[in-house]
Amino acid sequence: MFDRIRTSVGRLVKSLRLEEPAGGEKRTHNLFEAASEYVAACAEDDQDRMDEVSTWVSPEALSFGVSELACRAVIALARERDESPRAVARTLLGLPAA
């Protein structure tokens, strides 16, 4: 199951991979781009990429983006499994059913 999620997120991240614009101008990244790249780098255990992405936005913005991504992922999995978001979150974290 986690491999499917990792593969899907990896494809999404690769499709969103951002190139620096011509002329050497720095591109401004939004917090959701940063969050998706950061989580994908975490899943792939790519510390260099995590370090790079963490400079794109403020730590508070990155934290908010990662939290929003987690919420959306849990909701999507809950719908796919026909379970409650709470049950899915607890399962993902290896916690016993409440």
Image (cartoon, rainbow, N blue to C red):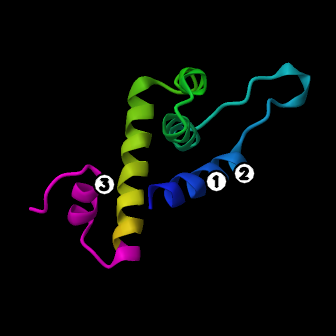
Residue at x 63%, y 34% (from the top left corner)? 29
Q: CA distance from mark 3 to mark 1?
A: 21 Å
Which residue in the rendered view is the most extreme toward the left?
98
Q: CA distance from mark 2 to mark 3?
A: 26 Å
Position above or below: 12 against 23: below
**Is residue 88 covered in magenta?**
yes
Q: Disc 2, disc 1: CB below 8 Å?
A: yes
Q: Position of residue 44 (x, y in %)?
A: 55, 38
Q: Amino acid at mark 2?
A: Ser
Q: Disc 2, disc 3: CB below 8 Å?
A: no
Q: Residues within 10 Å of mark 1 (few under 14, many from 20)?
A: some
Helix, strand, or loop for circle 2?
A: helix
Residue 19 picture quarter: top right
User: Given this view, does label 2 or label 3 mark the residue nearer the observer?
Assistant: 3
Where the C terminus falls, by quadrant? bottom left
Magenta stretch bounds? 79-98
Residue at x 81%, y 23% (from the top left corner)? 25
Helix, strand, or loop for circle 1?
A: helix
Q: Considering only order in the chain, which callout, 1 or 3, is on the residue closer to the N terminus?
A: 1
Position above or below: 34 against 80: above
Q: Position of residue 95 (x, y in %)?
A: 18, 52
Q: Is residue 82 left or right of residue 36?
A: left
Q: Nearer the viewer, residue 14 or 44?
A: 44
Position above or below: 89 against 14: below
Give the residue number, with chain letter if any, for mark 3: 92
Q: Considering only order in the chain, which callout, 3 or 2, is on the residue closer to the N terminus?
A: 2
Q: CA distance from mark 2 to mark 1?
A: 5 Å
Give the residue number, with chain letter if any, for mark 1: 12
Q: Position of residue 84 (x, y in %)?
A: 24, 71
Q: Amino acid at mark 3?
A: Leu
